[in-house]
Image: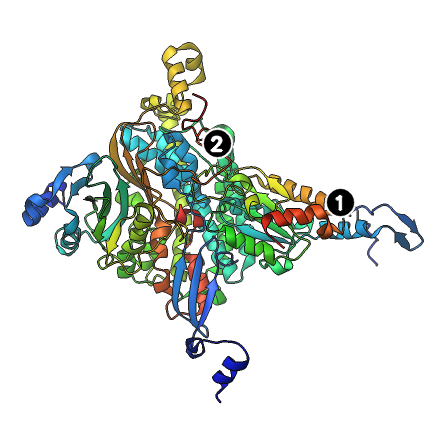
Amino acid sequence: MPRPVQYNTKVKIVDIPEGYSGEGFHATSFDKVVGLARKNSLWPLPFATSCCGIEFMATMGSHYDLGRFGAERMGFTPRQCDMLLVAGTIAKKMGPILRQVYLQMAEPRWVIAIGACASSGGIFDSYSVLQGIDQVIPVDVYVPGCPPRPEGILDGILKLQDLVQNESLRRRNHPKYKALLESYGIQ
Amino acid sequence: MGLTNEIIKKRLTEKFGEQLTEWEEPFGLLTFRAPAAMNLKVLQFLFDDEELRFRFLTDLTGVHYPDRKNEELSVVYHLHNLVDNVRLRLKIYVPVEQPDVFTATQLYSGANWMERETYDFFGVNFLGHPNLIRILNVDEMDYFPMRKEYPMEDPTRTDKDDEMFGRGGTIV
Amino acid sequence: MSELQHHQQHHVKLSEESLQKQTTTLNLGPTHPATHGVFQNILEIDGERVLEATPTIGYIHRAFEKIAERRPYYQITPLTDRLNYCSSPINNMGWHMTIEKLLGIKIPKRVEYLRIIIMELARIADHLVCNSVIGVDTGALTGFTYVFQYRELIYEIWEEICGSRLTTNIGRVGGFERNFNETSFAKLRKFLDTFPHALKEFENLLNRNRIFMDRCIGAGPISADRALNYGFTGPNLRAAGVDYDVRVAQPYSSYEDFEFKIPIGTVGDVYDRYMVRDVEMWESVSIIHQALEKIEKIERDFPEQKNIFYAPEADHFHLPPKEDVYTKMEALIYHFKIIMGEIDALPGEVYHAVEGGNGELGFYLISDGGRTPYRLHFRRPCFIYYQAYPEMIKDGLLSDAIIALSSLNVIAGELDA
């Protein structure tokens, strides 16, 4: 006896962007589709240095699953990832290395600063700690906390997804973006 | 009966006599001071002697006392006798103009990085160390940050100043 | 003309020695998926065989010891959290015990048993990370995801008591900030009921697994003499065969009332370290059971002790109860002074050591009678045993070097401080 038909009611599917649809086709603008694709398949590059790294590992784990948002594959190489997750304190000795990893990433690339230490130096107001990674690379989302709860990290990634969806495809040619990168000395 | 602090003190004074000074026992840990040039002799004696057997170097660190003239930098060794379960603390003092101390790496391999850390933070020059370069701070740093005269924060910061760090400033 | 001359004339300038060199220089850089933490190793390898290694550390140097000279005693507790952040309650308790030793405060038994429960939970959490990461580095990723579920249970217990999951800042000088409520004991019992089953499953995955054993046995060995000379402590030393455990040698916080075994290995290779940590987790579960029984016994025999969660002698450092703050003058003054960090400690010099997840974590405190320490030095076990890494992997294969690194359980926060 054939199995009865089961309709998919439990898995959430992303809404179709608005456009004109008809029999077997749906027409919408290109950047909406690209934004949709980009936001739901952000591949993260974990740059975990200290305690926030352990909370990040917990976010990646099964309890607060990060894979549901498309970030299943943790690539450890900058060449293949879109999203740089800097979790933990960045010391002045580590700054040039962080910058080099950022430069090796291909456009489009986004940066999330997880934790107080990455956002602003945190409780370590000392001579050897970089007071915030935005001294060396441009940052898109800051997640406060010491360490932030995994829900907080997920919230940061969701905010980044909003940014990614609404971003124009011509971002890298925009003068404001170019000026931002110039201020960091990045070509 | 076991190895007590009195026995250790007696053996050490038999061997080295009046050169070991400042005997104290804060919280039960026998502490004494040796002249800076004798640190290896004392450590070697404590290592080789069959009754004392201090063959484990727990810790090696430095302290800066800017007020003690001519003996500002101190190197403190914490030793442990694992068989009889007794700890010991040895201190030596060197002046800050010539902070030369003989290295203990021949005796304890673990002293290698601990001396590099003491050099990095205080500037104590360990004679005979195989690789005395900075270990924790950036290589280009030209001062010794743990000395008391340097502030905790980065002195080259422009966005926060002395007033925000709680030191003086315009608001009295 | 020869190949070299041809090249030098027309193509790339190669130095003579770079062509003669037989070995490859490999940079196992600060950002590497296998180095769990930021430390760099420059390896000279000949094919797959490692000839020498030069470790470089300091990539997360946060200057704890310098910061500690500017902070009152309670503000140093969050700093100690971040030393070995996989088992931060042990660091916190060790720091509070150092201050209590300096001030001469005696802690009631019930509080000490509660502290032991928290510290053994932290030890389990630390060893879970290390063992699952050894599994990940040999390719067994499943153990990692399973084990982190049980770390979540431990986090829930800590969260119930102190409010924070990872960097706990748990406890105060003299005891705890609040009494353990019924929910925390219920969560603790739930953990004790479910965890042994999960640990058994994890053991079934790896302990007698042919592939795992072939990878790990004989990788990264160190002999007991060399380990002692380097200053190893903790599971790495016990894997080499020396049964030194600070909980037994200098018992603190009433560890002498408990019965537990100390596992030791023989060769000191990766498999021994893994097995020592595994057995230590079982021993920690047994210690927590014993502690719960002892606490119940105290509460049966002396029912008024049920509400003791700190030592009354620590009133200079522990916040007074709120009813007293609102009614008594001196409680108000103490409250103000403690919060503002204006309490002076006695002058003195103390060294106190606890058995951390990685070994003997020592606190060397020199106090000059002020509100901040004059000098605070952390005797960090990771820093001391990581020096032996080049010697451990010499003449081994490259993949053995990777798992030797993860089996040492080097936590970057403790390495650099």
**Res C116 → quadrant:** top left
Q: Chain of mark 1?
A: A
The percent position of residue C315, horizontal first and vertical second, equals: 34, 21
Please give the residue where the numbered disc 2 appears in the rendered image: C161
Q: Secondary structure at mark 2?
A: helix
Q: Quadrant of the N terminus of chain B?
A: top left
Q: Nearer the viewer, residue B143 or C417?
A: B143
Q: Residue at x 46, y 39 (%)?
A: A124
Q: Amino acid at mark 2?
A: Ile
Q: Is residue C116 visible?
A: no
The percent position of residue C313, horizontal first and vertical second, equals: 31, 22
Which is in the foreground here, disc 1 or disc 2? 1
The percent position of residue A54, horizontal first and vertical second, equals: 52, 46
Q: Residue furthest front?
A: C9
Q: Residue at x 37, y 56 (%)?
A: C386
Please give the residue where the numbered disc 1 appears in the rendered image: A166
**Res C344 → quadrant:** top left
Say few, some or many: other residues with alpha carbon within 10 Å of mark 2 (under 14 / 14 to 19 / 20 or more).
many
Q: Nearer the viewer, residue B37 or C83?
A: B37
Q: Amino acid at mark 1?
A: Asn
